[in-house]
Image (cartoon, grey):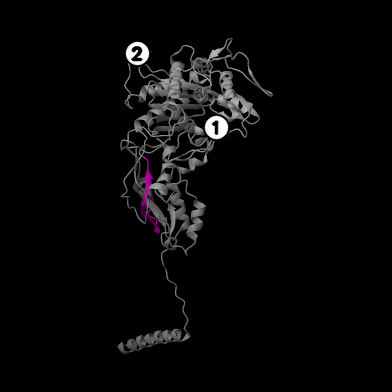
Amino acid sequence: MSERAVYIFLSLAFAGVVVQLLILAAAHHVDVTLAVSEPVAATSFSRPDIVDRNGRLLATDLEAPSIFADPGIIVDRDEVVEKLTTVLPDLDGRQLFRDLSDRSRRFIWVRRGVSPGIAQKVHDLGLPGISFRYELKRAYPGGTMAGHVLGYVDVDNRGISGIERYIDEKVGVDPVHSAVLSSRPPVRLSLDIGVQHALEDELDSAVRRYEADGAAGVVLNIKTGEILASASLPRVDPTWPLQALDQKHIDRMTGGTYELGSVFKTVTLAMAFDKGIATPDTIVDVRKPLEAGRFTVTDFHPSDRPLTVTEVYTHSSNVGAGMLALEAGPEKFEAFLKKLGLLDQMQTEEGALAAPQVPSRWNRISTITAAFGHGIAVAPLQFAAAAATILNNGKTVQPTFLRKFDAGTADGKAIVTAGTSREIAHLMRLNVVNRDGTGGKADVPGYRVGGKTGTADVAGKGGYTSNSVISSFLATFPTDDPQYLTFVVLFEPKGIAATRGHRTAGTNAAPVTGQLIARIAAQLGVAPETVTASQ
């Protein structure tokens, strides 16, 4: 072909293109597709750190890679799904395949907040259309420690329970579109990591030793209301919010209500002392059971003689406690419980406690049974707060999970007299050191421990079960000037060889409490007396 022919061919081709463009323009026909990446819809939130009372880290934000896909440039969907599921075996492959099939979408999340190791493995797969973006992910250096208290955050780093939710509602978080750490000061809790560890460790040991279904416990500063430790077993991992859906993982300290048994006699005797119904030396004839309609109330170890009110407490007499409550009458007894905060739902920074379950009407039988902790169910933390109020010279104690920087005593409302408070502390000490007391195994030489046992049958459908109990031990130390309160609860412990088959609180919850106090008293700055002086 000559040079002239080539020029002619190219000119004709160019002319053909020009003509075609003119035809399209004249027809005003528009058929243009514009590929625009779908915006990243998720906005994350940066959160302040959470630290214990001494500044030790409990929760923080970290930068974490998240995996996303662009369906528009993925060539082989089957290959992508197959290879990703080898690295992320819990990935929903069918759903991912459906998402990748929609080529009108240009952005879908595959997995958010993965570890660097997982991200590297996905990167090494070399899959076109699979990319990464850094976001904030909540991390908990202590693992499961204080998991119930700390709570959970969702995939966008928003608090959904516990202290994490409190931060969103009261402290504040900041919306971010990338991994930008918070500049807010840390949230300082009242918890002490050392005390928290000791409590959880002792509860772990107790569950194993007594083959219990679960356990809960709290350590409370009586003077300030600060919660130094709060635990519930089985534990939860704050990084796995789905555990919250499992009923056995609820926070038994705040999220459930239970009939707590004879620890309630502490409240009943405080009422009797404060109303002038009895003194520690008042004689109560407990030899006959109490009758109320078709119900008969007896003592676990019936007495063949009248008891003093002190002995009603140390012998843990149901009959004696019921008689004292009846002496006050249903209306006054109910009013006292309400004034003490046991009949209304309680709030803390962790959230609302489970609402108390109280008698629909207060009559003879409900008054008798409530006097020794049956027929009324409360959250253990709520009962601990009521007991702390009695021991705090009778002034209201409001439990808090936040550090109080004013070390002075909380200026609470007077509920009972200081004299009643001293009498109860003295009775608790006698219950530990007297030979006929039920709390002897909680004693820790030098620390003047006082306490009260509670062993309650578990309520079931149609009545109480015959082989399941909740055992608990309420303790305070030092009893000459109560500073700290502990409350340990074991759920359905079994009778073992070491307890000679018994499941009562004096054989399990009491020794657990003694071991706990022996570990934490020095941490809390309580100076021991000499063994001779303590006895």
**Can you say which quadrant of the picture contains the C terminus?**
top left
Alpha carbon distance from label 1 to label 2: 40 Å
The residue segment tinted magenta is 121-140
Could you tell me which residue is drawn at 59 percent across and 19 percent down?
319
Q: Which mark is residue 335?
A: 1
The image position of residue 96, as x and y in percent, is 48, 54
State the residue in front, 318 or 513.
318
Mark 1 residue type: Ala
Choose between 124 and 444: the one closer to the eye. Answer: 444
Q: Quadrant of residue 321?
A: top right
Q: Left or right: 198 with respect to 490?
A: left
Number of marks drawn: 2
Res. 376 in view = no
Name which of mark 1 and mark 2 comes first in the sequence. 1
Vertical side of 92 occupied by 444: above or below: above
Task: Note whether 260 is above or below 27 in the view shown.
Answer: above
Relative image position of residue 149 (x, y in whole percent): 42, 38
Most distant residue in the top direction: 304
What residue would you read off at disc 2? 533
Residue lying at 59% horizontally and 15% vertically, measured from the top left: 286
Q: Secondary structure at mark 2?
A: helix
